[in-house]
Image (cartoon, rainbow, N blue to C red):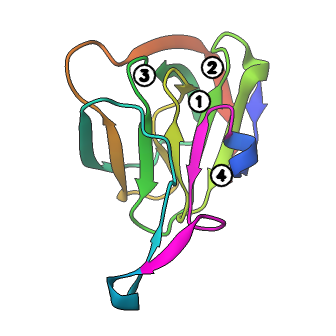
Amino acid sequence: MITLKPEPLTKASFAPFGDVIEIEGAQHFPINQGFAERFNDLARVDVGEVNISIVTAKVRPKPIGLKLMERHPLGSQIFYPLQDRPWLVVVCVEPQDSKSFRVFRATGRQGINYARNTWHFPLLVLEDGSRFLVVDRKGPGNNLQEVKIDEIRLDVP
C-alpha cells in the first residue's frame, strides 16, 4: 500500500490539474469609492450553465484511505473555503497509476478550480462543519465519472 504525504498547495504545483484561487499575486484594484479591493481573474470557469452552492463537510475517519477517484467531463469545479481552515486536495493524472497521485495541503485562504476531466478525490476537510462555496456545471448529461482504485493511505497528522 502506498502512503501519500501532503505538500503545500501552490499555483505552479497545481497547474496541471487546474487553478489555485487566492488573492496573493492576483491583479487587483480599488472599487466602491475605495472602500473595497477587487481581485480579478482568479480561475478559468468552464461550465456552461453555472450552479453556485454551499457545501458543509465532515472529517473522514483516520487513517484516510482513498478507494475511488472522480472527475467531471462536462465542466470545471471550484471549491472555495468560507472559513480560514486548512483542507486537503488529492489529484492524479491516472487513477490506476499510484505514482501519479499528489496531495496538497491548502490554507483556509486558498480555493481550487479542478479543470475539466481532472481526476480528484471528493472534498477532504480537517475540521467538521467546514463550509465551501462550490461553482460547477448544471444541466443535462452525466458530469460525474467515478473509478474504484486500490486503496491509497494518506499520512495526515
Separation of marks 3 and 1 at Cα, in angstroms? 22 Å
Q: Earlier in the sequence, mark 1 or mark 2?
A: 1
**Closer to the eye: label 1 or 4:** 4
Residue 96 highlighted magenta (yes or no):
no
Amino acid bearing label 2: Glu
Q: Which residue is mark 4?
A: 105
Q: Position of residue 6 (x, y in %)?
A: 72, 46
Amino acid bearing label 1: Gly
Q: Residues within 10 Å of mark 2 (few under 14, many from 20)?
A: some
Separation of marks 3 and 4 at Cα, in angstroms? 22 Å
The residue sitting at 58% across, 44% down in the picture is: 19
**Closer to the eye: label 2 or 3:** 3
Separation of marks 1 and 4 at Cα, in angstroms? 16 Å
* Above/below status of 130 relative to 17: below
- Front residue of this view, candidates 38 and 130: 38
Would you say the residues marked 4 and 2 are in contact, meaning their CB atoms lie under 8 Å apart? Answer: no
Q: Which residue is mark 1?
A: 65
Determine which of the numbered discs, if any, sits on residue 72 in the image. 3
Would you say the residues marked 2 and 3 are in contact, meaning their CB atoms lie under 8 Å apart? Answer: no
Would you say the residues marked 1 and 2 are in contact, meaning their CB atoms lie under 8 Å apart? Answer: yes
Please give the range of residues in magenta: 15-30
Q: Earlier in the sequence, mark 4 or mark 2?
A: 4
The residue sitting at 71% across, 52% down in the picture is: 10
- Figure label count: 4
Q: Quadrant of residue 144?
A: top left
Q: Which residue is mark 2?
A: 151
